[in-house]
Amino acid sequence: MRRSTTLCSALAGLIGLLGIAQDAVAQPFPSRPLGLIVPFPAGGPTDTVARIMVEHMHRSLGQPIVVENLAGASASIGVGRLSRATPDGYTFGVGTWGTHVLNGATLALQYDVVNDFEPIAQFTIEPALIVGGRTMPAKDLSELIRWLKANPDRAVMSTLGPGGAQHVAGMFFQKLTGTNFRFVPYRGLGPAMQDLIAGRIDLMYGPASTFLPHVREGVVRAYAVVGRNRWAAASDIPTVVEAGLPGFDMPSWNAFFAPRGTATNVIIKLNAAVTAGLADPTIRSRLTDLGQEIPQLGQQSPQALRELQSAEIAKWWPIIKEAAIKAQ
């Protein structure tokens, strides 16, 4: 009798556990709040556009999305956390050209920038600008290249440290143009901009929206948009191709990724929330007001993001390897 009672209790417990498991499986995704990892400081350009996106995404998904900023180590701290997250769709993160292309070539990472993540969607593109200070005599990009060739190692360009996007852009520019200039590292774009305006440095590369107010004020000169198309927010600035430097194409993109192993149906649902947000006129207006460009619908799929990342890696890793660029 005692053994029979014990067996019945065990069976009842097992049945109860199976019932709980079935209920959990039956719950549609998402059934609780989600978390978004932004591997950059709060208030920065990437953080700002990501927060605009999740404002709409949470309505599509029917659940709150809590944003967590995990900055540091060239964004590898936050991206590393994402790579270790449970692949259930409840944690996803922001990725950029810097985090999911550049860092794979310049940092010793504890994760693989391709194989440890599932692409969800690209959601914005921000063109970059090459700008110069008022003391730089060149008035356009062709004149700048000629001046740099005539004055090797005289000009100074800011970076955010060896191996960063600005450093790689400067090295690539030198390679394409046969010029030489010096690099000076800064802790942020703000201090570098102050020195550019003051004439202590000569050149900068970075997000177009960061430079545009200063260009409009006339305190810095925009030489070219580093992209294939003119920037809608400043259509008077020529592209690098129009300015005589084809091949110098380094668009900055923002995208969402999930940990490796996240189920396909979950990725599809997250992607649908992104595309719904990008189709919303209010969201589009807010993003474009910040100087962001919206990728075409065909560029918003997980497969399109994977192809974009693969193409960028194929282009940039050999260049970075040849130049022996490493982050410090």
Image (cartoon, rainbow, N blue to C red):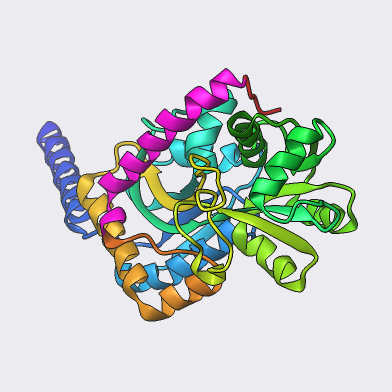
Residue 205: percent from left, percent from top: 67, 48
Q: In this view, does 322 lie to the left or right of 298?
A: right
Q: Is residue 172 left or right of residue 59?
A: right
Q: Which residue is drawn at 65% across and 49% down?
A: 141
Q: Is residue 101 left or right of residue 166?
A: left
Q: Residue at x 13, y 31 (%)?
A: 3
Residue 317: percent from left, percent from top: 49, 26
| Residue 32 among those drawn in magenta | no
Q: In which quarter of the image is residue 157?
A: top right
Q: Can residue 43 be seen in this view?
A: no
Considering depth in this image, is 284 or 50 the residue closer to the camera?
Answer: 284
Residues in magenta, as a range: 298-323
**Vertical arrangement, residue 49 with respect to residue 309, above or below:** below
| Residue 317 among those drawn in magenta | yes
Considering depth in this image, is 163 or 141 the residue closer to the camera?
Answer: 141
Considering depth in this image, is 177 or 317 the residue closer to the camera?
Answer: 177
Q: Is residue 289 left or right of residue 177?
A: left
